Amino acid sequence: MSEPAPPPPDDEDEAERERKRARRRAWNFGFSENVPHNRALGMVVEDIDDNWARLRLPYDVRLVGNPETGVLHGGAITALLDACSGAAVFASLDRMQPIATLDLRIDYLRPGEVGRDVVARATCYHLSRNVGFARAVAYHDSEDHPIATAAGTFMIATTPGTGRKP
């Protein structure tokens, strides 16, 4: 006797998941416009899904750290990794809530190439009730050849009456 076929996927569940994805993408695509620092640096949200984000920092001479070499300042790379990690945490949330960076560790592995945009991809790999955990990498062409990597934790705001003590 053969096993019964698995039930067909529930279209409503898939439709609800897609609505949530679309809502998260909308939050995050507004991210570069609604955060003045990200906008000032020229960050562009390239793609977002359920728990990850990809942002791009266009090369700009205003962001150069050493005029003799033309290499982007490490602070601009840090800001990109922080923003991308935060976007990944936002993408993981079921509802829009403020977040704040608690800790961000950056390992600089090599300088970026002069005149080239830097891409960052971050994944939120764990959410607790009040903290999101993310890993990120900054690169030009491939994550396998990183400029820098990051690990960050982000506080997820709690609503009044849910355990916050005055």
Image (cartoon, rainbow, N blue to C red):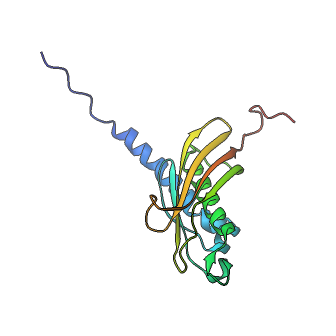
Q: Where is 130 relative to 42, above or below?
A: above
Kindly tell me whether residue 79 is visible in this rendering.
Answer: yes
Along the line of sight, which residue is nearer the eye, 42 or 105? 105
Residue projecting furthest to the top:
1
Along the line of sight, which residue is nearer the eye, 120 or 149? 149
Along the line of sight, which residue is nearer the eye, 77 or 153? 77
Horizontal side of 161 relative to 92 (left or right) equals right
Q: For the point 67% across and 65% down, which residue is it?
A: 35
Query: Where is residue 52 shown, x and y percent of the image?
Result: 50, 51
Query: Where is residue 102 shown, x and y percent of the image?
Result: 73, 48
Kindly tell me whether residue 99 is visible in this rendering.
Answer: no
Q: Where is 41 relative to 146, above or below?
A: below
Q: For the point 54% across and 50% down, which residue is it?
A: 91
Horizontal side of 155 relative to 19 (left or right) equals right
Q: For the point 65% across and 62% down, which residue is it?
A: 78
Horizontal side of 11 relative to 66 (left or right) equals left
Query: Where is residue 11 shown, x and y percent of the image?
Result: 34, 40
Q: Where is 7 relative to 81, above or below?
A: above
Q: Quadrant of the C terminus?
A: top right
